[in-house]
Image: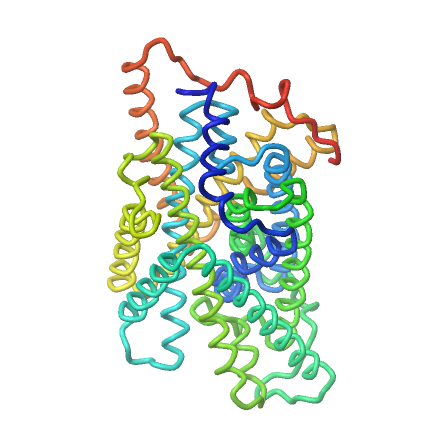
Amino acid sequence: MRQGTEGEGAMSSIKSGEKAEKPLKWWQLSLLGVACTIGTGYFLGTGLAIEMGGPAVLISFMLAAFGTYVVFDVLARMTAEEPIKGSFRSYAKKAYGGWAGFSSGWVYWSSELLIMGSQLTALSLFTRFWFANVPMWIFATGYAILGLLVLLAGTKGFDRLENLFAVLKIAAILMFLAIAALALFGVLEGRTHQPRLPVEAFFPTGVLGLWSSLIYAFYAFGGIEIIGLMAIRLRRPEEAPMAGKVMLGLLTTVYVLSIGLALTLLPWKAFHSNKSPFISALENYHVPYMTQIFNGVLIIAGFSTMVASLFAITTMLVTLAEDQDAPPFFARRMMGNRPIPALGLTAAGMVMSIMLALFMPGSIYEYFTTAAGLLLMYNWLFILVTSGRLLDLTGWGQFKRYLGMALLLLAVIGTLAHRTSRPGFYVSFIFVVLIGVLTFIMQFIRRKGNPKDPSPANEQGFKSFPAKIKSKAD
């Protein structure tokens, strides 16, 4: 592998590509992070978590928030010191060599592919709230085509759209919080249930239920790695940690407050996986057109994160192709410097997702959500492992890193404890095995073609640093 020049080549590519675009301020990156994160994993996947863990799901979300913070913190520190195209995938390659970059990139690509499947399914479920008799695949096809058109419009259009969606999503959540507050103070009266704090049966499914729900809490925070890909566009890369802290602080506050209020408005057994818990809570109160408006916001949120996934999956594929970890054809740009071949492969993956939604409408969302969340967790684990090689962490920093790894492993193993999430674990395992086999084949071919290049890892670490990046604020 070309370890000696990779960092220089990546930076050169950035300057000729991403850096030519308008740089971002830290608060703009925070807003994009909110837009790329608040989506179907939160608005619909929370229902799965509540079914498994009951009110104790609030603990799951706080644990997931801490684990997410640890992952983003180390990723932001690496980005602040040396922004590199490909973000975590490129850092993995610098830390452990070509096999790590190849496997990390393709595991992430696979996770985003499955995430798009779950998002298309969720969007179809939300839209059937208005058109119950229309087949899901028709909605899924329409949203897929619309998402591809947004990406074809270019990065500037993507930024503006995501910023607008972020504002709309935050406004909708604030609207839900206001309605919940009115219900708590008796201004609004429930049709079948009255507000009641969920303290009597906080652990209705026991520790096992809480454990099983942890993966869906982590899934609701999925999107921070997309911010890692966008962080190279920051005007001041050293502000990446600040952008992440503001974003995660806002997300955690919003998540815990809104879910806690939803569980106060309705008993936890009233929530189901095929319906947003927030829609269920609003339906219990006489607020004209509120459920209709909120359902529209759910569609906006799901479409927003689907477009973000499209951006991430296309960007990663182009990076892999440019570094010869994917067929070079996918790095080609056409029609105004747009990665048309990469978008074509992404579209093929979306077609597969739509077909699955057509043949398996009842269980596809649970399977896709679990498998996507697991593949994302595998990638987050590798980010933490990579940081141990590239960052010179203090004792407290190392403790946080190991604690974050433990939380991620708990979430992964917890999927085996519940019949709903277990099939998703097997799906993710199949993906990992296939990528592992491909990684072995690629390494064998490359070493056979260039026997003088062992490239098991990059012995020099970051080119612009003596050995490791000194982490100054653990």
Seen in the picture, residue 322 relative to 367 is either above or below; the reply is above
- Residue drawn 30% across the image and 52% down it: 335
The quadrant holding residue 197 is bottom right
User: In the rendered view, does 270 fall on the left or right side of 144?
Assistant: right
Residue drawn at (48%, 71%) of the image: 298
Colour scheme: rainbow
Q: Position of residue 468 (x, y in %)?
A: 63, 23
Q: Nearer the viewer, residue 444 or 378?
A: 444
The location of residue 144, given as percent across then percent down, is 33, 62
Residue at position x 58%, y 63% from top?
54
Residue 410 position by quadrant = top right
The residue positioned farthest toward the top in the image shown:
452
The answer to which quarter of the image holds residue 254 is: bottom right
Image quadrant in which the C terminus is located? top right
Residue 108 x/y as whole percent: 42, 42
Side of 326 where 474 appears, left or right: right
Q: How many marks?
A: 0
Q: Is residue 263 above or below residue 160?
A: below
Q: Nearer the viewer, residue 74 or 315?
A: 315
Image height check: is 11 above or below 318? above
Location of residue 233 in the rendering, given as x and y in whole percent from the top left corner:
55, 45
Quadrant of the rendering where the N terminus is positioned: top left
Q: Image check: 256 left or right of 351? A: right
